[in-house]
Amino acid sequence: MSIRETYDLQLEKLSEELIRMGAAARQAVQQAVDALKNSDVELARAVMKGDEAIDRMERDIEHQCLTLLLRQQPVAGDLRKVGTAIKMITDVERIGDAASDIAELSTHIRSDQFPTLLPHILQLAGTVSQMTDDAIRAYVQEDLKLAGEVIDRDDIADEAFCAIKREIAQNMAGNPAGVDAALDCLMVAKYLERVGDHAVNICEWVQFYKTGIHKHERIV
């Protein structure tokens, strides 16, 4: 097997590991929201414990990337691909952290406390989960169009978060005794909104990988 063929296999393995890590983070978000919806403390604890596995994946992928950089000394597009992977895993790991934080908050909230709010939280969760899936897919498929669509979708997530904030403010005004739970719900929504932000960050690095430009600035 030639050096290039070996290198291509290593890049393929890197993509596979990124897909696995992205899927784990996305599943963690969904399970954290399910724990909130169903007041499932055991599921919430499982999500919090599972964050350790996502952290390990980050370290493993980082090691793979550094090994590729040191041994293969990639240039141009290959260098950007490996560099992008290093940046991406930070955002994917933070998505996992957000899921763990949502799971922890869910242990303090009963879904029946805010029945009109839950559908909006579920809608936001669905939006940012799909953004996460598509962001990873954009990297693997080198799809600039999909990356741009994910970035544009951030406006939808932001609008959903603002709507949740308004409803929480109304709930707090009408139910002063439920202020603590309302603030917990607000934090859940904020963590979900951050998941969307991390998906956008991933896609901005996909754009860099394909163009050498990051946030309108040429890097390499």
Image (tube, rainbow, N blue to C red):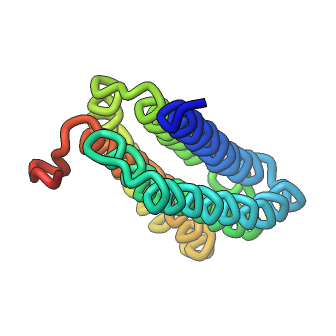
Residue 195 vs 133, above or below: the answer is below
Residue at the (67%, 57%) spot, across then down? 57
Return the x and y of residue 101 as percentages of the image width and height: 63, 67
- Looking at this rendering, what residue extends furthest in the front direction? 2
Q: Who is closer to the viewer here, 80 or 113? A: 80
Horizontal arrangement in the rendering, residue 21 relative to residue 43 (left or right): left
Residue 49 sits above or below residue 40 on the image = below
Q: Quadrant of the N terminus?
A: top right
Q: Give whichever of 1, 129 is nearer the camera.
A: 1
Q: Is residue 82 left or right of residue 62?
A: left
Residue at point 63%, 50% (across, down): 25
| Residue 167 visible to an observer of this rendering | no
Q: Residue furthest left?
A: 217
| Residue 152 in picture, x, y percent from top left | 27, 34
Q: Quick check: 21 left or right of 211?
A: right
Q: Nearer the viewer, residue 68 or 156?
A: 68
**From what the image shows, is residue 69 above or below residue 20?**
below
Identified at 54% across, 74% down, the residue is 176
| Quadrant in which residue 9 is drawn | top right
Image coords of residue 150 (percent x, y): 35, 34
